[in-house]
Amino acid sequence: MTKRTANNLVAIAFLVFFVSVAIVSMGYGPRARLVPMPIAIGSAILISLQLYLQNAKNTKLNLAIDAGELLFGTKDTKKSKSGEKKEGLDKKELVAFTIVAVFLALIVIIGIEAAIFVFVTGYFRLINKDRWFKSLIFGIGTLLFIHLLFVTFLNVHFYKGILEGIL
């Protein structure tokens, strides 16, 4: 199975899942479907766009999806300097796992909203090497969007973190 076929199968499976979630949530009451419906519809639109872009003939866009490699095992094993094959995590995967672990730790310690701001700002500053001003704009913008969507419009209250009880 080629990498492109594996990626298409994974994307189609996600598309079917999100469409199913949207159909099932239509049977919920008006307040109960406020969260799953927009997420399912938005995700289905993004997956459809991804399918189009990765299969368009005239695009040079590399979406770099490795879900097919994880599910279908199409990733080659690496060879060490001595020549034998070795399997395991490479540097990029360790960085990705570390980023996720740091974000989860931030959520537990300082809460979701503060963790989003710190994480997005830090990501743009440290990983993307953007200037502080641009990083802060992205962090504040993301925080405002999440706050307006969930707290203001959907009336969802977020976890405040361990430090709220201490302070």
Image (cartoon, grey):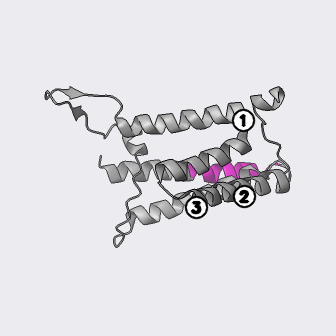
**Number of numbered discs:** 3
Instruction: Say which mark, if any, is on residue 134.
Output: 3
The numbered dot on residue 60 is none
Q: Mainly helix, strand or loop, the magenta region? A: helix
The residue labelled by disc 2 is 145
The residue to which callout 1 is attached is 110
Name the image quarter holding the C terminus: top right
Amino acid type of the residue tagged 3 in the rendering: Lys
Which label lies toward us, 2 or 1? Answer: 1
What residue span does the magenta drawing correspond to?
16-28
Q: Which of 167 and 114 is in front in this view?
A: 167
Disc 2 crowd, CA 10 A, few/some/many (<14, 14-19, 20+)? few
Within the image, what quadrant is residue 112 found in?
A: top right
Which amino acid lies under the numbered mark 1 shown in the image of this protein?
Ile
Dot placed on the residue nearer the N-terminal end, 1 or 3? 1
Q: Is residue 62 above or below residue 165?
A: below
